[in-house]
């Protein structure tokens, strides 16, 4: 139960925080429209993944289905880690501090860069 709660909190943070951060940072004047577009693209991608998963489940069984979902989560997490770095840099450096970009590269982004290197 504890592991399930930790996993749910990690997923919910990504689901609720990253789209808002990306929309407000990259599209400040049109963030509601960008957020709606992100939601539509995520729905389209999720529908395709679940459709493929139902075919895998029907033809190859539960083991292949869970393996496919694990691979999709790994690919999505890797993509998210690689694409969120520029958004975080831009959101943190918008007029906050002239030396902030150096600190972001050294301190804040070290764990993210290590995860992206995997």
Image (cartoon, rainbow, N blue to C red):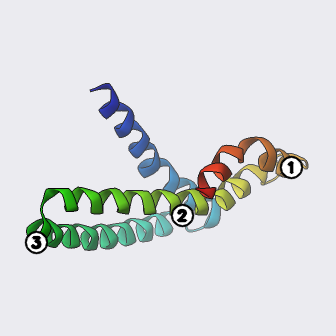
The answer to whether 109 is drawn above or below residue 40 in the figure is above
Q: Which mark is on residue 59?
A: 3
Q: Which badge, 2 or 3, is on the more N-terminal residue?
A: 2
Mark 3 is surrounded, within 10 Å at the Cα level, by few (under 14), some (14 to 19) or many (20 or more) other residues, namely: few
Mark 2 is surrounded, within 10 Å at the Cα level, by few (under 14), some (14 to 19) or many (20 or more) other residues, namely: some
Closer to us: mark 2 or mark 3?
3
Closer to us: mark 1 or mark 3?
3
Residue 46: x %, y % from top left? 30, 66
Residue at point 86%, 49% (across, down): 102
Residue 48: x %, y % from top left? 26, 74
Q: Nearer the viewer, residue 68 or 34?
A: 68
Residue 81: x %, y % from top left? 57, 56
Placement of the C terminus among the 4 image quadrants: bottom right
- The extreme left residue here reads 58
Using residue 60 as the reference point, say whether residue 95 is left or right of it: right
Mark 1 is surrounded, within 10 Å at the Cα level, by few (under 14), some (14 to 19) or many (20 or more) other residues, namely: few
Residue at point 40%, 45% (across, down): 11
Closer to us: mark 1 or mark 2?
1
Write down the residue under mark 2.
31
Cα distance in 3D space between marks 1 and 3: 51 Å
Q: Which badge, 1 or 3, is on the more N-terminal residue?
A: 3
Write down the residue under mark 1.
102
Q: Which badge, 1 or 2, is on the more N-terminal residue?
A: 2
The answer to whether 2 is drawn above or below residue 64 in the figure is above
SS class of the residue under badge 1? helix
Among the 4 quarters of the image, the one containing residue 70: bottom left
- The extreme right residue here reads 98
CB-based contact (under 8 Å), mark 1 and mark 3 = no
């Amino acid at each position: 139960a504890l592991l399930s709660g930790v996993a749910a909190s990690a997923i919910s943070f990504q689901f609720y925080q990253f789209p808002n951060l990306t929309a407000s940072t990259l599209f400040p004047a049109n963030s509601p429209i960008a957020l709606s577009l992100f939601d539509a693209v995520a729905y389209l991608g999720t529908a395709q993944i679940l459709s493929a998963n139902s075919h895998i489940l029907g033809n190859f069984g539960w083991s292949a289905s869970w393996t496919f979902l694990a691979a999709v989560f790994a690919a999505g997490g890797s993509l998210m880690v690689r694409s969120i770095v520029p958004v975080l840099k831009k959101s943190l450096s918008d007029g906050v501090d002239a030396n902030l970009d150096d600190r972001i590269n050294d301190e804040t982004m070290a764990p993210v860069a290590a995860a992206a290197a995997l």
